């Protein structure tokens, strides 16, 4: 049983990892056929994994309602909203927001509730970034001063008013983005990518097992 | 430091945003080389070329990326390119469908004949590989459930190798990097990117190395593209408010530092920390 | 009198959209029941929408429709997917490890060569560009800052990449020449972060501009001045909530 629970998953990871790492370098029709089928399977498996994530959310709020913790009324509202959306989507629109150019009931919910809620949720950050800029963006050191100057030049150079009032700010902003910023991002990208490759190799060789979900027999 | 109630700052931002929207001052938009590169590539594509537009964003990035999408689609339809659309973002499916329907109706283009919207499918990188191997296996039907096999718009298109130009408009991951790593790296189509302002600086290394041949960054990028196609829309309309907002932030930052240095000087503290 | 009539569903939709937008914006005053209502509605509707789309796009389009055409291949990934769902049954939850091993193994395997090629090799290739160009039999070195591919910019880029990479390499002590290199790396990083901050400000402001543009659209007579009416109602609600809260001793 220990072999099934511990060794078999590690063996599967190893075989799949090595096979599909090597597949990239093998243009043989059998190799291409394998990646065609497996990538299609992954689409379907990803759907099941997504459903797992969605089900967890159901569970969290169900527990809140059952235990009647503070704010459980809002969990009821969440559940009602979820169930209404699912019902309308399944029976009025077949999962489509538009049918032959006409908006469905599901599309109405999407356009007039989900879109404004999601868009507004992220747009309030604009206010907080302004407040934070006033409270915290001080040139306490040389490094902070450099950051501040670069930020001001880019903010001026990337809007029409800045380009109009301070014409050189556009050219300097372009240079900062194309040269200095590129250098920094490239270095970070190379470093992070090496980390990704190292982690992938560790997973394939069985040194990294956190994806198996823990437990004594890992 | 003189503290200001943050609600006053919120009010300043609200005024700086709303007043220019109500009374625009209409400053000219300067076009950057990275946006012009995308425009010129599409402009030089022969009629009937296959243009793939992936709208990899959801409503949280709608103000920045919807204008980019609409400007690109108008340009592609004007050039009579065959357009394939899809999205990697589940919650952006309705938005992407809406954008395609709106612009297609405006340009009198027909689904199945001039364009096809494939919708969403899970898998991100695996989905790109699947499309790279066989588009019909990845998407047996389009978003409105019509089988895509035999559609005139997909004549001669078997997989991503048959795509002439691909643009991913991305608000994060999955997005442009994923399209490059799992798509262009093996299937060798030309590609460009459009992104939110937050993501744009991180894409400049790819632009420099030629992995993407152009980059449309944020609302400014969308406004530049609208200017190039000669059809001003919501992006150009929003740039005056953008200018006002930036100058309010710059003023707040300078004010904060002015108070900091004046008060520090009054307290007689030593100079910069090393 | 409006010039053209908006369909009733759009008119109601406009009022609902404005109301929900103002509920979320009410957080700018402070956390309050209107914001909490909007927040929970957002999560509920998003999850509901996701469930519907996953049902139709995965289970119907990719599985059921293929099975009805006589293609039984999707049953293999369905079996693997069902193994993932055994996580909900504690006695057989260990079976989900087999599915995760399959998925993670595939993902790691396909990622390695592609990441090495795209993120590492291609980026290094562009960093070590030639500094001089041959033109008409003579060698030239470009000092143009305006051209990102010029000789001078290539040198600056190379210095930037090396110093930033060195700064993050903590296995070697940053002393002597190493200290100077790391300091140079920090200054490059600060400029990069400054550019990132500038673009982040631009991005967040753009999102706000989008919402305000919609609020302005819904404030017209076509939509019955929805924004103005609901703004007044929201402010009145917040004022009465705040007064009640203070009267009850700020129990919230």
Image: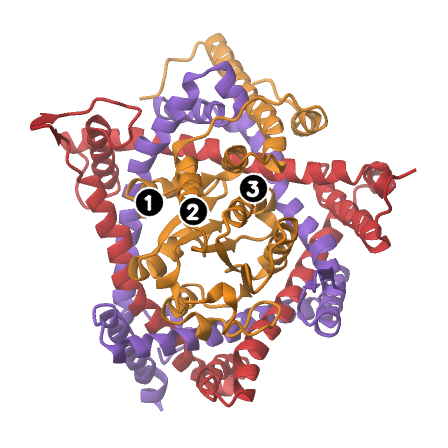
Chain shown in red: C
Q: Is residue A209 left or right of residue C231?
A: left
Q: Position of residue C119 (x, y in %)?
A: 28, 51
Quadrant assignment for the N terminus of chain C = top right
What's the colour scheme? by chain
Question: How many circles with numbers are drawn on the protein?
Answer: 3
Check disc 2 and report its element: helix, strand or loop.
Answer: strand
* Identity of the residue furthest to the right in this view: C1
Q: Can residue B171 be seen?
A: no
Mark 2 or mark 1, whichever is nearer to me: 2
* Chain B color in figure: orange
Q: Quadrant of residue C245?
A: top right
Chain ID for label 1? B
- Rounded to the nearest angstrom, the CA distance separating label 2 from label 1 is 10 Å
User: Which residue is at 37% across, 85% downward?
Assistant: A5
Check disc 1 and report its element: helix, strand or loop.
Answer: helix
Earlier-in-chain disc, 3 versus 1: 3
Image marks 2 and 1: residues in contact by CB distance under 8 Å: yes
Chain shown in purple: A
Earlier-in-chain disc, 3 versus 2: 3
Earlier-in-chain disc, 2 versus 1: 2
Q: Nearer the viewer, residue A92 or C137?
A: C137
Residue to which mark 2 is pinned: B193
Residue to which mark 1 is pinned: B206
Q: Is residue C128 left or right of residue A145?
A: left
Q: Position of residue B67 (x, y in %)?
A: 58, 42
Residue to which mark 3 is pinned: B64
Q: Nearer the viewer, residue C157 or B8?
A: C157
Q: Nearer the viewer, residue C24 or B1?
A: C24
Q: Quadrant of residue A100?
A: bottom right
Number of residues whose C-alpha sits closer than 10 Å to that of mark 2, classed few (under 14), some (14–19) or many (20 or more): many
């Amino acid at each position: 049983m220990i072999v099934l629970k511990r060794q078999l998953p590690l063996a599967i990871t190893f075989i799949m990892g090595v096979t599909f790492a090597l597949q990239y370098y093998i243009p043989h029709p059998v190799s291409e056929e394998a990646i065609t089928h497996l990538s299609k399977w992954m689409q379907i498996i990803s759907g099941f994994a997504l459903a797992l994530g969605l089900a967890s959310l159901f569970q969290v709020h169900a527990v809140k309602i059952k235990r009647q913790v503070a704010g459980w009324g809002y969990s009821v509202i969440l559940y009602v909203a979820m169930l209404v959306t699912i019902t309308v989507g399944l029976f009025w629109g077949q999962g489509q927001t538009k049918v032959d150019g006409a908006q469905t009931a599901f599309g109405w919910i999407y356009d007039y509730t989900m879109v404004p809620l999601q868009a507004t949720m992220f747009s309030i950050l604009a206010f907080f970034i302004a407040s934070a800029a006033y409270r915290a963006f001080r040139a306490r050191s040389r490094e902070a001063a450099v950051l501040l100057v670069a930020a001001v030049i880019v903010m001026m150079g990337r809007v029409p008013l800045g380009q109009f009032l301070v014409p050189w700010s556009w050219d300097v902003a372009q240079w900062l983005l194309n040269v200095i910023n590129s250098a920094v991002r490239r270095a970070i990208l190379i470093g992070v990518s090496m980390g990704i490759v190292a982690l992938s190799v560790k997973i394939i060789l069985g040194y990294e097992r956190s994806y198996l979900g823990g437990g004594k027999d890992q | 430091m003189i503290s200001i109630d943050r609600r006053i700052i919120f009010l300043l931002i609200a005024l700086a945003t709303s007043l220019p929207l109500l009374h625009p001052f209409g400053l000219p938009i300067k076009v950057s080389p990275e946006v012009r590169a995308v425009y010129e590539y599409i402009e030089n594509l022969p009629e009937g070329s296959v243009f793939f537009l992936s709208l990899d964003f959801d409503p949280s990035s709608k103000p920045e990326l919807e204008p980019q999408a609409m400007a690109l689609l108008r340009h592609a339809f004007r050039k009579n390119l065959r357009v394939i659309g899809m999205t990697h973002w589940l919650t952006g499916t309705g938005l992407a469908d809406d954008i395609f329907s709106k612009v297609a109706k405006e340009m009198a283009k027909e689904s199945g004949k001039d364009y096809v919207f494939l919708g969403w499918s899970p898998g991100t990188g695996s989905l790109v590989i699947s499309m790279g191997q066989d588009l019909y296996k990845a998407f047996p039907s389009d978003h409105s459930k019509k089988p895509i096999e035999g559609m005139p718009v997909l004549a001669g298109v078997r997989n991503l190798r048959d795509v002439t130009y691909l643009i991913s408009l991305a608000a994060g991951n999955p997005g442009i990097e994923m399209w490059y790593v799992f798509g262009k790296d093996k299937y060798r189509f030309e590609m460009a990117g459009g992104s939110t302002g937050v993501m744009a600086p991180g894409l400049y290394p790819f632009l420099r190395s030629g992995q993407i041949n152009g980059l449309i960054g944020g609302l400014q990028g969308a406004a530049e593209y609208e200017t190039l196609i000669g059809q001003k829309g919501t992006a150009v309309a929003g740039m005056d408010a953008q200018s006002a907002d930036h100058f309010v932030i710059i003023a707040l930052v300078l004010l904060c530092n002015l108070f900091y240095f004046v008060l520090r000087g009054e307290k007689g503290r030593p100079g910069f920390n090393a | 009198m409006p010039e053209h009539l908006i369909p009733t569903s759009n008119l109601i939709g406009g009022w609902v959209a404005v109301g929900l937008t103002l509920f979320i914006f009410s957080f700018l005053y402070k956390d309050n029941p209107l914001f909490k209502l909007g927040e929970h509605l957002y999560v509920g509707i998003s999850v509901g929408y996701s469930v519907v789309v996953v049902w139709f796009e995965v289970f119907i389009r990719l599985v059921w429709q293929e099975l009805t055409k006589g293609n039984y291949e999707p049953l293999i990934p369905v079996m693997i997917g069902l193994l993932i769902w055994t996580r909900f049954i504690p006695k057989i939850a260990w079976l989900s490890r087999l599915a995760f091993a399959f998925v993670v193994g595939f993902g790691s395997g396909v990622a390695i060569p592609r990441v090495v090629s795209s993120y590492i090799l291609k980026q290094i290739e562009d960093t070590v560009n030639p500094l001089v160009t041959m033109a008409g039999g003579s060698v030239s070195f470009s000092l143009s800052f305006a051209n990102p591919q010029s000789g001078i910019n290539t040198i600056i880029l190379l210095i930037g990449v090396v110093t930033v990479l060195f700064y993050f390499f903590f296995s070697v002590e940053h002393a002597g020449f190493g200290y100077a290199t790391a300091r140079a790396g920090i200054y490059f990083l600060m400029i990069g972060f400054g550019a990132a901050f500038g673009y982040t400000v631009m991005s967040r402001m753009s999102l706000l501009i989008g919402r305000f543009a919609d609020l302005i659209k819904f404030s017209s007579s076509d939509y019955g001045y929805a924004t103005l009416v609901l703004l007044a109602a929201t402010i009145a609600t917040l004022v009465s909530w705040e007064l009640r809260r203070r009267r009850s001793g700020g129990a919230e």
